[in-house]
Amino acid sequence: MNKRFLKVAAFSVAIIAAYTLFSSLYVPPMKPEEPPSLEAVEIASGVEGFVALGEKIFKGKGACALCHNAAGRAPLLDNIVDVADTRMAAPDYHGTAKTAVEYIRESLASPSAYVVTGYGMAGDEKTSPMPDVTTGAIGLSRQEVDSVIAYLQRLSGIEVTVTPEEAGGIDGAGAVDASAAGAEGAR
C-alpha cells in the first residue's frame, strides 16, 4: 500500500478518536423527551387556555412558526381570518370551505386547496410545500387543530369562536387528548 494513504488513514482515525473522546468527556448527553400524549388545559381557563394551547402548538409541535414568520418563507397568519373570505372567492381556490374557520381547518389538512401567490413549490405554484399537519410527523389531532384555529382567531384580533367544548376535546379531568393524531384530519 501507499505510505501516503496509510498516513492519511492513521491521521483520520486519530482525529475521529480525538473528537469521540472529547464529546464523551465534555459534551453532556442529550436525553430525548417522550412527546406528551396529553396537553393539560385547565377548565377554569376555558377559551384562554385553549388559545394558549394553540399558541404552544403553533410555535412547537405544529412547527408552524418555522415558516409562517417575518422571514417570508410562508405568508404571515396574523390576519388569516380577515383574508379567508377573499381567498375562498378566488378563482384558483379548490376547496370546499364556507367559513373562515372551515378555511383554516382545510388549509391545515389540505394546504394545496389554495396556494398564496409566490408561496407554491418551486416550478409549481399550485402545490403548497406545507405538509398536511393532521398526518405524518406532525400528526395534530382535531382538538389540537381547533386550538391552533382559536389562536389564529385571537392573533387576527377577532372573537374566538372555537372552544375546547365544541372541539370535543376536554375530558372530565380538563385535558385535551393530543394522542389521537389526525383521526378526524382526513376531511
Image: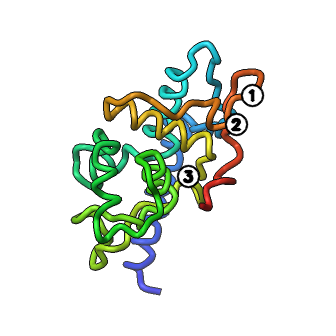
| Circle 3: residue type | Ile
Residue 11: image quadrant is: bottom left
Q: Residue at x 27, y 52 (%)?
A: 75
**Residue 58 image position (x, y, % from top left):** 45, 40
- Left or right: 123, with 154 as reference point: left
| Circle 2: residue type | Asp
Say whether disc 3 or disc 1 marks the residue closer to the N-terminus.
Answer: 3
Q: How many marks?
A: 3
> Callout 1: 10 Å neighbours few (<14), some, many (20+)?
few
Distance between the Cα atoms at labels 1 and 2? Answer: 8 Å
Which callout, 3 or 2, points to the residue nearer the camera? 2
**Pointers 1 and 2 in contact (C-beta within 8 Å):** yes
Q: Residue at x 61, y 13 (%)?
A: 44
Q: Residue at x 64, y 30 (%)?
A: 165
The residue identified by callout 1 is 171
Q: Is residue 97 above or below residue 82?
A: below
Distance between the Cα atoms at labels 3 and 1? Answer: 23 Å
**Pointers 3 and 1 in contact (C-beta within 8 Å):** no
The residue identified by callout 2 is 177
Q: Secondary structure at mark 1?
A: loop
Say whether disc 1 or disc 2 marks the residue closer to the N-terminus.
Answer: 1
Distance between the Cα atoms at labels 3 and 2? Answer: 15 Å
> Callout 2: 10 Å neighbours few (<14), some, many (20+)?
many
Q: Which mark is residue 138?
A: 3
Q: Is residue 43 above or below residue 148?
A: above
**Residue 53 image position (x, y, % from top left):** 53, 30
| Circle 1: residue type | Asp
For the view shown, which residue lies furthest in the bottom direction?
1
Q: Secondary structure at mark 3?
A: loop
